[in-house]
Image: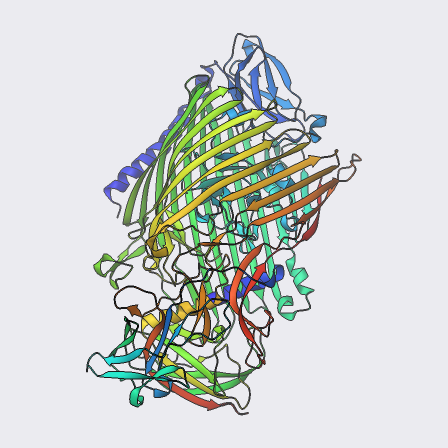
Amino acid sequence: MLHGMNKQLYKAIFSFFYLIGLSIFFQNSSFSQSLPDRISGSVKDMTTGEVLPGANVYWSNALDKGVTTDTDGIFSIRPIDLPAELTISYIGYTSTLRVITEKELGKDIKFFLNPEAQSLEEFVVNEARENSNVMSLDIGKTNLPVEVLKNIPALFGEVDLLRGIQLLPGVTTAGEGTTGLFVRGGSADQNLIQIDGAPIFNPSHFFGFFSVFNPDALSNVELYKGHIPARYGGRLSSLIDISLKEGNTKRIHGEGGIGSISSRLTVDGPLLSDQSSFIVSGRRTYADIFLALSPDENIRNNQLYFYDLSGKLMFRIKDRDKITISSYYGSDYLGTSGQFGLGWNNWISSLNWTRSIRDDLFLDVKGYHSYYKYLIAFTDESIGFEWSNNFSESGIRGEINWVPSENLSLYAGAHSQLYHFAPINLNLAPESNLESINTNPKIGFLNNLFIDGNYDVSPVFSVEGGLRWNHYQQIGEGVNYLYENNDPANGAVADTVRFGFGENMKTYLGLEPRLAARYLLSESLSLKGAYNRNFQYIQIATNNSAGLPIDRWMPAGRYVSPIRSDQVSLGIFKNLSDNQFELSMEGYYKDFDRIIDLKQGAEILFTDNLETEILSGVGWAYGAEFMLRKNIGKTTGWLSYTWSRVFRQIDGINEDQPFNPRFDRPHDVSLVLNHKFNKRLEFSGTFVYTSGVAVTFPVGSYEVDNQRVPLYGPRRNEDRFPAYHRMDLSVNLKNRDRGRWWKGSWNFSVYNVYNRKNPFSYQFTDIYNNDFRVDPSPEDVITSSRPGVIMTYLFGILPSVTYNFEF
Amino acid sequence: MKKYLYLNLFILLALFSCQEEVHLELKNMEKIPVIEAIWTNRSSVNKVSVTYSRDFYDTLSNEILSEADVSITNLQSGNRIEFMYVDDLGHFLPLNNQVAEIGSKYRLEVKYDGQVYFSEGEMLAPPVLDSVTYAFSEEQFFRDEGYYVTVYGKIPFDRDNYYRVKIIRNDTLLNRRSDYLLFDDSFGTSILDNGFELGGFAFEKNDKVKLELYRLNQAPYNYLNQLVNLLFNDGGLFSPPPQNPTTNIYVENGNGRVGGYFVTSPVLSETIKISDEEK
């Protein structure tokens, strides 16, 4: 049964979508023609037909009357006294000038730009306006163009989006070999990673060694870590907004690569007409082949692979409407001897419709579904099992963007999200003596309304303000356990209350104000500030630092509150040498409320009573981020330094006192360089230096139950690993361009050039016979035993080669 | 089941990782007493040992505390059983070889240097251990070739189901970290009904295998579980922050630290000899 509150909410949501429908239904061409006070059109690449987002469109004799094209390459500009000359420019392309007369008012005008011949020698990392670093309201936002990403030297030559993001200030990792991101003090589950607007639950392959994104399939990546506009929400610490590439509308085009551990292929082109396109992209590893060559039978019998597939269809209807359908499927499998297997899959689909309702009114509607599943199977007559689980998020989101004047842009919309966490499924072998477990589904229903606006108060002062209102419910089907003294931490289960599908189990409301301001001190210098509040209604119950494929997500409910963060950030942004260099310094303070950790010895994988295993508390983080970035010229890249601290305070941990989580790494330096020697040869290098992770080392040892056991102090994470540092280099050599349809290039990269042994773990254990490799079995003769420390490190110097091609 | 996941993880790590022994500078903490008290209905396993912790890199044996006053009191009858230090063994034994009685609750007290360390536990009724058999198995990926033992019995309880199996091969307790066998009723109580095969332990012909089945209270069961997790904790990304197992021994005035655990448990045991013929 739906409660009264729900009905009101649903009315509001449905009203919103209804109004959207009405506005589209009743708007007609005569209406749009009745307002011929704008000139609109699109900007595209002449050779590929791809739209050019971020192109500058301005009147040649009124440079301040300019706009930029949106993500679909569409612009709308107010006319000045006509006829007048309109300039369309885009970095890397030859500018176009065109005289506009009154006859063209209200018409759609198409501009096609030619790529500049010399653009191969220029390296453009930011497609936005050259001084957008200073001019925009963005604070704590970084764009990572895919071309830049592809130039960063990569582990095994596998270009990796999340590893690239780890090189940005404010983003740390909990250790080598993981793609988990920790942004401004937030844990890894506080990042919303979305592909074309659909979230992805587990963004990693091979337990986090690689991320799930095939770089050839990506168009753009934006990281929001400071100010997140109110039209986005759902996680506390960051939004990583990834757009899949759209196919070009001119010709069949392909690109791909044959690498050390995987190969990839992407094909795109027009679909039926030049108004629609397709792109399909695939990647698969072949580690299985190498495993088969191993002399060790145990390794030889393993299966180990991942693959991913993605595709996107685009249909443009009369330049006013665009529909895209995107899908991504990724799969991992690790198996041993056909007896044991572990696999996981992400499957994400989204449908997006954008419409220019009028020259100043735009609509964006999106529907999506994200599904994640894992399966662990062990084949054995008596102790075999199949253990699987799945969860999903389905959503629909509508957004209206109204630009009533050049200095005001407004957004309003609604977003409904349905989280479904299925019961754990455990099938035991027929002869098994174990009994299966019984858990219940958990369903969260989150509805958001948002309004957001940018306003240029004066030529030097701009503000962006927004509100996001959340209405969250845990709904049935599900079970609430009632505990003695209403205390799940200590009390036994006193009663069980079952809820039917759709019944309200628990409601939370949240209001998220978001505010940002920019003050221009000069054309190349600005001050910015922002305040953001975020709520998050689902989180992972874990006490390890790396994401595992079997992580247990937990929606807010009767005993687990949504988590909340408040962040204040200030920044100074300066461009130097005619916008060749961008300099920024940002500081932030962030407060976390009701974050969770696990009790000691918590068993969370199979229990239906997760609330009995968790502890709750607060956290805070602060830091300063410095970044110098060069975007143009033969040498490009960035140098960043972050000083930051992260604290948690949770009753029941660290004697109830504040402690640093593992990913508190105060100093973090990244240097990313790329130099193009000529059209064929380019060099890239990265260097990273990070304080060691915060850990707990033993302070002694004792003997109990015939074991020598390390003794730990009462405090958590008061020790540190040694600092982490590493240098990677790569060279990219393009084959001579003889005008053939096939273009090839070789990438040679070396990971960890100076073979730094960065510790992955330290094990405090007994060393037998003076040899740390001895793991004594009862048959072994033990001549000596002493305490010792064994360090495990992952990757020494690691060369790799990749052949990339394009046709 | 979790261990299978980690097994895969370790295989993956093994492909990419290297190891070496290193020396880390470690802080040292003032030594703390560690009490290990086993109180059962079988006199041969009963004992209380009190030792001190030491610096991590020390190679000397842990200092043994022999001066303490150790006793266990039956909280229902009030009967107080004194313990006496036995030099040769390095631990305390009850006077007159007394043993725990099924159904009784006990309080352990260790007095030393003005401090009183105490714990309490209940001697629960034992499950049923019917028989132990064995059968030969060829080598498979997850098991060596050898004889595997199966335990038959019955768990007739609907609560306090926390069990430990100790395996003694040819009079030697198997005590590697991978030899711990602890189970509760998370997966039901019918585990012994149709035979519980001890899958991780391959025996050879002529081995004498002794099994001891303990029914523990929850606190010492948690202690042992956390102990095993700690022994496998490599301090890496995939491990939780290491912590000492939660002791069920307390300091009476609330100050001071202590480690170890007090277990009160019935013991069932069975011994078989592996021969050619399967049994």
Query: Can residue B186 be seen in the rendering of this structure?
Result: no
Q: Does residue A203 sit above or below A101 in this rendering?
A: below
Closer to the camera in the image, A334 or A573: A573
Closer to the camera in the image, A32 or B225: B225
Task: State the colouring used for the structure image.
Answer: rainbow
Quadrant location of residue A336? Answer: bottom right
Looking at the image, residue A377 sits to the left or right of residue A43; the answer is left
Closer to the camera in the image, B240 or A466: B240
Q: Position of residue A798 (x, y in %)?
A: 67, 53
Quadrant location of residue B47? Answer: bottom left
Q: Position of residue A584 (x, y in %)?
A: 52, 31
Outermost residue to the left? B77
Quadrant location of residue B187? Answer: bottom left
Q: Position of residue A799 (x, y in %)?
A: 69, 51
Query: Can residue B273 be seen in the rendering of this structure?
Result: yes
Q: Quadrant of the C terminus of chain A?
A: top right
Exactly how many numbered labels are in the figure? 0
Q: Does residue B157 sit above or below A235 in this rendering?
A: below
Closer to the camera in the image, A343 or A695: A695
Q: Position of residue A51 (x, y in %)?
A: 59, 29
Give me the residue at 45% from left, 27% from top. Answer: A528
